[in-house]
Amino acid sequence: MMQDYDYAGPSSGRRGRANKGKEKNDRDVAARLQKELDRDLDEEMHFSAGLGRLDLSKGTESAPGGRGKGKGRAYTSTTKDRFMESKPLKSVHKNSKPTKRSSNTEYPEPVGQALKDLQKWAKAIFATKCRKCQTAYLMKDFDVGQYFASWMAKRDPKDAFSICSVVCPDQACGAETCLGCDRKPRLGKNTATANGLELDWCCTGGAVFALWVVLCMYDEEELKIQSQSDKIVAANTPKPNMFNSIYGNQQKGTGYGGGYALPGFAMFSSGLRPTGARLNFQQVGEKTDDVTKNMLALAIELLPEAHREAHPALCAMIQLSLLQDKAGSLLRNDSLRNVTPRGNLYYAVFEWVNRLGKHPDLQYLVCDERYPKKRSAGIQALSIGDTRDDINSGPAGDRALVLCDSEEGMDPSLFGCMSNLATQSSNVISAAEAVSGEFKSRSGQDILTIARRIRGIHKSLAKKSRDPQRRPQTKDKATVWQWYHQHYRVEFVPNMISFMRSDLAQAAGALSYSKPDRVRRIAVEIAEMSTGLPPNIFVRADEARPDCVKSLIVGPEGTPYQGGLFEFDILCGPQYPDQPPIVQFRTTGGGIVNFNPNLYANGKVCLSLLNTWHGGSAEEKWISGKSTLCSVLVSIQAMILCDHPIENEPGFENYVGTPTSQLIDHKLQARTVNYAILDWLRVPEMRNGLWHDVVKEYFAANSHGVLATVRRWASQNQEIMSFRASIQPEYLMGSVFGARAMDMLPGMRVTGGGFNLLSQLEHLLHGGR
């Protein structure tokens, strides 16, 4: 039974053991065995064409012997290895696109090549005979579950055993044969320790077989979880015997699964998911963390070192295994706070990505986009290409692996999946450098350690992947704006507190008490917003005081606020996150304009989530440990800057569509144009202030859309064509625009005693055109 052990990253030990014996190289015996083997192989109909000879007597070519230390005979190349040679996947995978498939058996070229490599390798492995008696197929009754269980039972370093060999079923013989090189397994040649489990394999080919066993076991467990989730378990479905599937021999065998239940690893027991439904690797959450972590620990130790060539079959089985999809699902977690408690699992995932990325033959497995799986029968079924209806339900043909059509797009690479976590990690590290004292606790050090690990791996892989940070070279301004928001939505800036409203800045300076880990929690939340904020929300935080935050929200499309830039100041008080932050609205024309029944001219933001509105249910109020800064900003964007602001006024919910509602919408449209659009263009303190980069990028990318919106409004809204400020002209002249404001705005025309906002906007954006 596999024990529960922690995987703490790349520090799992490996050591050599003394060689416990060498096989005698008797060439006369080898020659006789060669003749017998040739005769037997010629009789096999499945191998009558293209099969090389297993030359034990002349196989003297030296090849790398795999990983680990210790003594042992060098790996000897045999015809079996040459038979399993295939065109490496790395030569066909890059930039390949899905092909149009006329049947289920046609796959994109990289996938088809992977299946070919895997099945050719499996055919050779299952043709292995006993090295001594040559009369028995070693894999005839092979049961991967029982074989794997034998690994789990061997945890004593003194109890040496080979994880790549099989004992002859003939009791009169009982010889042990390595499935990688067909020789007597050499103990101590390649060894490793995977968190308490001693591993010992004979040769490079033996490591490939051992990895195949690990991936088979993982796929079976994952398929069981997927099937249980979809309630399509077929516990009594007959299981195929892999040997019989290849040779057509109907003798009874245990097959794979075979009814054997290994504690902690449920055997493959179901059909496939319904066509059209993608596999879901997040449906069980942390329930399978131990299984995934332990399997990754084993698989990592069996990967070849970067200077060793990777066998094409090894590349194929990793590409086709569900373990890759599971790793991608875990890496798409957008929350460092959720990753840290599952650190043991994530360290294993990070090391898996790191090891694959370092190997020149394997790095494409983490740097290239992946073909998404709708369903899979697992590595075992893929290895034999079994297509029988009692194994795979669905249309006729090869149903072992079903891929999404090209129009559904590719899944991101593992490198791409961890990009969000890498961005968050960089922001957390930056914050920790500015407020180092807040990260001295154990939880703070844990999150910093993970952040540094993520950033380091992602940075090393960035050199091998297409640069995702490069500004898109396109004339499509919407794409450029989307890219800009994605990369600059959150930033830590120096002395940002000086841009906050004076009363909040004073309150921040007067703070004399801070809840333990408060600033660290805030810094991590802000870092998470760097990948989690919805479009058109920007955040800036003071690098030395992350509890002081400013936000700029673009008015949503279809609302009276469309295209406007609305600013908010946020202070997380001493009891945060047990209590909500203080939020002040800044786009008020200097304290003179209401923009919503929930946005007051004095800056008050009325919202249940902030506990500033006492209506609503308990779920709508601030919940300690659950509510976040991000949830506040999303609520403001969605619930306050809404389609029909009159709905936010108690007792007026049913006024939508009435003349009263239309009148309010028209007034808010005009105020949006004047205070939330024009002010950012004409007031130097705003245009060149904290948000100057965002404002510049915004109008460069969206000026056409903003102008089109205002023209559409103006065609029905006289308030825009003749806007009157709600205060005295002398206040407007002195406090908002400064002296001689009229001379500063030569493009603005006054009609009927009011400002023509449309003409002013046209002048500022396009010089009057």
Image: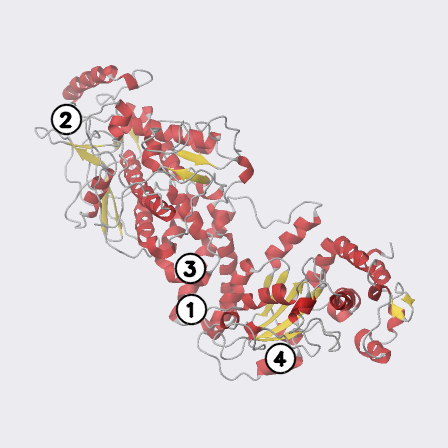
Residue 11 seen in render: no
Distance from the alpha carbon under mark 1 to that under mark 4 = 27 Å
Say which residue label 3 marks.
339
Quadrant (top left, top right, bottom left, bottom right) of the C terminus? bottom right
**Disc with the residue nearer the chain's start (4 vs 3):** 3
**Disc with the residue nearer the chain's start (1 vs 4):** 1
From the viewer's side, name the closer residue of 744 and 596: 596
Distance from the alpha carbon under mark 1 to that under mark 3 = 13 Å
Q: Of the numbered discs in the image, which one, if any, rests on residue 692?
A: none
Say which residue label 4 marks.
505
Say which residue label 1 marks.
444
Q: Is there CB contact under 8 Å for labels 1 and 4?
A: no
Distance from the alpha carbon under mark 1 to that under mark 2 = 59 Å
Where 641 falls versus 312 (above or below)? below
Where 390 falls versus 334 (above or below)? above
Q: Is there CB contact under 8 Å for labels 2 and 3?
A: no
**Disc with the residue nearer the chain's start (4 vs 2):** 2
Q: Is there CB contact under 8 Å for labels 4 and 2?
A: no
Residue 416, position as x, y percentages in the image: 50, 48
Label 1 neighbour load within 10 Å: few <14, some 14-19, many 20+: some
The residue drawn where x is 17% and y is 27% is 130
